[in-house]
Image (cartoon, helix red, strand yellow):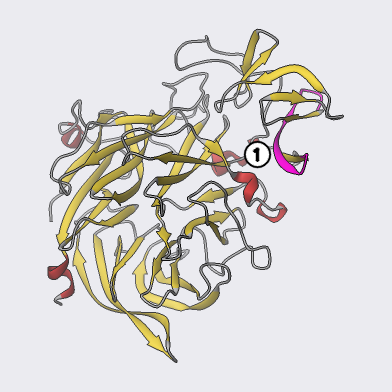
Amino acid sequence: MGLGKILFCGNDERYLDKKYIAFSDSTNGGSAFRLTSMVNADGTLVAVVCKQTVGEGFGYIELAVRRSDDGGESWSEVESIATPPARMTGEGLNSYCSAYFVNPCMAVAPNGDIVMLVDFYPESKDLKGNKLFDKKKIPYASYKRRMRPVLYDRDGKFYIIREDGVVLNNKQHETIYKVTDWKGSLYKGEEYVGNIFLNGKTGEVTEHTTFGAPLKAPKRNYIYMLRSSDKGKTWSDPVDVTSDFLIKEDGTFIAVSPGSSITTPDGRIVMPLYAENKQSVSVYSIDDGESWHRMTQQPYNSNTEEWQAVLAPDGAILALGTAQGFDKTPLSISYDNAKHWEKCRPTGVLAPKCQKSVMNIANYVFCSHPSERTRENGVISIGRFKRSGGKTVGIDWYADSEINTGYFGYSCMAQIDEDHIGVLYEAQPSSLICFKKFRIEDLIKF
């Protein structure tokens, strides 16, 4: 099958073949694109991806959105909705002179808002260069019974950022410093002295570039939340929510599993995360994303790495994880709204090590994934929930429907209307993300 509709298309020959660059224009173009998240917000499809300046998982990475009000037939132009602080925005392959976003995951909250969790990194190279991470520096400290972000100076002394941005010293006394925005702009009195998420003092201050501050946030990954109350047209500033659920065992890395998440009938948003130890993490919100929680009795959900969840008609939540090679997909199930998880035998979806998307319509389950030993030949596996002893215990898969031939990477599905679902997927290793529409009746008739 063909590519489908090209939604995000790179225009840099270092990252994408010329034959695909020919499709790049002012509506869909940028240097490079990766990672997919898509939801249906009351009839509007909202697709968010990472807009990159290089074809790597670090560097200057913004969040970009396109929207469709007609079931995926036409889309708005690419628009950046969150830009990180940076010393440089056009760096080469081995450079990392920028903070960045990566791994968006969206849900539609009970109040109708789109809620997104996404990773945010200070200037670094994520796990590919984790020697840059500050493994011995705590990122948060308690101040007036709330966890607040911590900064460090060159001598290792720590400071706390109060809720109003005023920086306190280690005796909790006010200093002359203040952090004035979510991007980490630091002022010493009236003087701007740099950005807490950047390294050296290289780079001039422009609309998109700045330099590092004398006080810095620990280098690790953080999880930020963004919100849209108008179906993806406008978005809130990112808010750091990491301290809501971070525990010591997570180390310097607790990340979002890209894709989409579920909202249960009683209004609980369940978001998929995973930690440095490769175990999956489940966090949830019961207040439309304002605050997030994690079960301390079971901090990991008996699964591996990136995962996606599907909600069975009886309320069971099934989590499909990531195999470490070409193998059956790990499965865990929760019967109490993602508070506790039971490890199950792997489910029968064969895939390489790669994120996959899963959703259901009534008793039918759909899972998009590469079907070969490498990330090739995308399919939608179709199944039905399997019940035993009066509860859902797994999924019986009975057919595959082809999405494309050739490269197939990360993907995200959403129901468009009563008759169709859509798949947003990586059609090249970097820089080409496509959308394809399927009739539900054609998928389930096998």
**Camera-side residue: 227 or 297?**
227
Residue 226: x and y in percent read 46, 39
**What's the residue at 16%, 36% (across, down)?**
19
Q: Residue furthest right?
A: 171
> What type is the residue that disc 1 sits on?
Lys
**Camera-side residue: 236 or 137?**
236
Task: Count residues near mark 1 (Cα–Cα under 10 Å), then give few for <14, some for 14-19, many for 20+.
Answer: few
| Residue 222 in sight here | yes
Name the residue beneath numbered marker 1.
131
Question: Is residue 148 in the magenta section?
Answer: yes
| Residue 138 in sight here | no
Quarter of the figure with the N terminus:
bottom left
**Picture layout, residue 150 above or below residue 192:** below
Q: Residue furthest bottom?
A: 389
**What's the residue at 18%, 52% (across, down)?**
436
**What's the residue at 41%, 66% (across, down)?**
265
Question: Is residue 44 in the magenta section?
Answer: no
**Picture layout, residue 131 above or below residue 293:** above
**What's the residue at 35%, 29% (across, down)?**
80
Residue 369: x and y in percent read 31, 61
What range is drawn magenta here? Answer: 143-156
Is 346 displayed left or right of 19 in the figure? right
